Image (tube, rainbow, N blue to C red):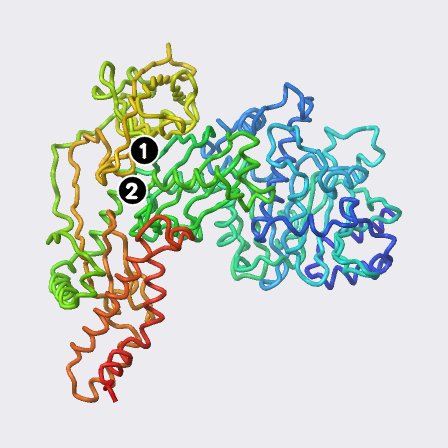
Amino acid sequence: MTRENKSLCLSLLTSESEDAAIRLLKHYGYWSDAPLWRSYGDKENNFGQIGSQQGQPAGAMVEKLVNSIDAVLMRECLARGMPLEGPDAPQSMAEALESFFGVRYGNLANLSASERAVLARNIGLVATGSKSKPNYTVFDRGEGQTPLSMPKTILSLSESNKLRIPFVQGEFNMGGSGALPFCGGEHNLQLVISRRCPSIANGGDPTSTSWGFTIVRRQDPTYGESHSIYKYLAPNGEILTFESDSLILPHGYADASLAPRLEWGTVIKMFEYEMTGLKPLITQRLYYVISLLLPRPGLPVRFYEFRDYAGDHPESTMHGLHVRLEEDKRDNVESGFPVAYQMKVLGESMSLMIYAFKKGRDKSYRRNEGIIFTINGQTHHAISQDFFSRRNVNMSYIDDSILVIVDASIVSKRAREKLFMTSRDRTRRGELYTAIERRLQEIIRNDSKLKELRDRRRREALEDKLSDSKPLKEVLKKIIRKSPSLAALFVTGKDLSNPFKPKRVGKKETFTGKERPEYFRLFKRHRKPRVNERPVNRHRFRIQFETDAVDDYFDRELDPGVFALYCNGAEVSDSDLNLRDGVATLNISLPNDAAAGDRLSYFALVSDDLLFSPIENEFEVVVTEADNSSSAGNGIRKPPVGDDDGDRETPDYMAMPQVLEVREEEWEKYDFSVETALAVKNAGNDSYDFFINMDNRHLNWELKEWLAQSREPELLQSRFKYSMVLIGMAILKEATKDQDSYFAAHNMIPEKLVADLTAMMAPVILPMIHTLGELEVE
């Protein structure tokens, strides 16, 4: 029987379709015999729990890889005689990686490419089958499970197997089952094979040297059942077993000796997996997406492509987005980035890194993600890059170039539960999430490096067009002034001839910091006996320090600095800190119960493990009466107080929009298509640049008829141009009029509204102007 079991297992492992696997199971008499199948997790009502996990197939696949990483780390811990939950076990994944594999600080970027490739032999992802219906096999040389233990481990739901193990990612014992709904065909087949690592096998388990295998299927509801049930093959309630020294995995090598081979560990094959949009070469799009979903994996993963693609069978080592960004930084990331911040929101500490890609260089790193939230190297939530086009952020000129990585690994467990669903791809949008989102808006909006990049990109977009735009703007002003209703609708302010005329302030010197600060002191204007005043209704304010520390002092992996802040003896729960070129900028909120007349004593402490003694600073803030003047702003002045950094160019912005014509040969530069009518970009300070498509499909259709009547084309083009601009201005005025508007409440992006609505109106605007202009009273 063991030999027969081995034959069935190997045949299933090399089957490349659901139908082929089912034919095998029928041949062996297993498929139609209901008593031979056991409920997954020993729960008849398991469909809801399994089906309510990851919403995307790549995210579900990542859970398999995370389980493999955990299994390898657990094998290493047990092989050293350490109980997984004992005091001698590593207390974090980074500690485990350094202790077990010599990965310094748990960061794969500290290994060479060849070292990562060797380490990646522990875990693999293999693509076989057809291009349209691929099969994916995940394997690892981890701890492995015995046939007797598989129902309580790999095939279980909601067990506490890893709940108290501090150095692994998995906690809820169900993420691995999230891939089942994405297994294709009619029955969602998944093959599971495992063998315990001999060096950690329990001699008391009679199956400790055997391979165990089963196949999971979805069974349609019968006899009044309301849901399907996931079941696995278990004759007499037991996992099928066989004996073998090793297992050769599916491959496409002519020489089988080159194929991945396991002596122990786990293999999971997902048949006809519905990897929608990511089915081509595994080493390309899927590689990029998984790198984003696992930006800092504990261990690298080897990808193998064995489908029928021309050329050699490609392989690649997936080591996560962080390593890719570090290694590609010179070619693909703007100079001066990434920028690091330490952020505390409602008492929860997070760090963030802001990357800015060179134009067009972001495509292989993300899809449309703008901000990703990670815990222990795995993405738990993403916000689209539309975030940067929000009115409160004002970065639409570089919205396709910014990527922010928020590391929430050290937030409290209670906060983690408030923020993230157990599926790791959704969030709970409560008070904490809203506060974090608002803080991110503030940080990104006010970051000087991002503002410099935005202004440079704007300058590049407008080059050679500003002189042409002047007469267009003058015509627009005349149109508005001639109509009392338009003049009332669009109140215009000061008009400047050049938005990029610089104001120079001295010369900036190159800053060279020290690994460990000799000083970290308040700017003179903040030091005692001087008192910092803050109106009670302006909660956010800024304090700055000067230091000789390097920019990454608080963010580096080796002996990072720690910044602590206290107000009247209590730790401050709401702040963010950024260190750049010898200036540390601290943004703080007044206490919620602050009242006019309060005197607040702040104590700041900077320390690290090797600093001879902590560096202390004290300052006072006096809360004054409310300031309701418009000049008071939002509590953080622009530009930042104390930004005495030399050679800065501070542009002035026009109240009237720049109106710029775009022709077909420029479409690619401005991301236009034949249907685009108008695009607007936020230039900062609530001013906008307007880009009008003068080769719009509908304009050209009308122009053809117009020219057939020997009429002047300029009149028709002007009608199209200025009607679209006025429509765009009306949309912007409504969409940006206040923070409580419908548009703001639903995070609708003004630029996208303008683009979508003007594209919809382009087919009718010229016929409407012409036809309505000819109407008579009769």
x and y percentages locating residue 213 in the rendered image: 77, 46
Between residues 767 and 151, which one lies in front from this camera angle? 767
Residue 537, numbered circle? 1
x and y percentages locating residue 580 in the rendered image: 29, 30
The kind of residue on which mark 2 rests is Leu
Cβ–Cβ under 8 Å for marks 1 and 2:
no
Viewer can see residue 104: no
Between residues 300 and 462, which one lies in front from this camera angle? 462
Secondary structure at numbered mark 2: helix
x and y percentages locating residue 410 in the rendered image: 50, 29
Residue 450, numbered circle? 2
Kindly identify the residue that appears in the image at 35 percent across and 66 percent down. Answer: 757
| Direction from residue 626 to residue 296 in the image, left or right | right
| Direction from residue 233 to residue 647 in the image, left or right | left
The kind of residue on which mark 1 rests is Asn
Query: Can you tell which of label 1 and label 2 is closer to the viewer?
Result: 1
How crowded pointer 2 is (Cα within 10 Å; few <14, some 14-19, many 20+) is rated as many
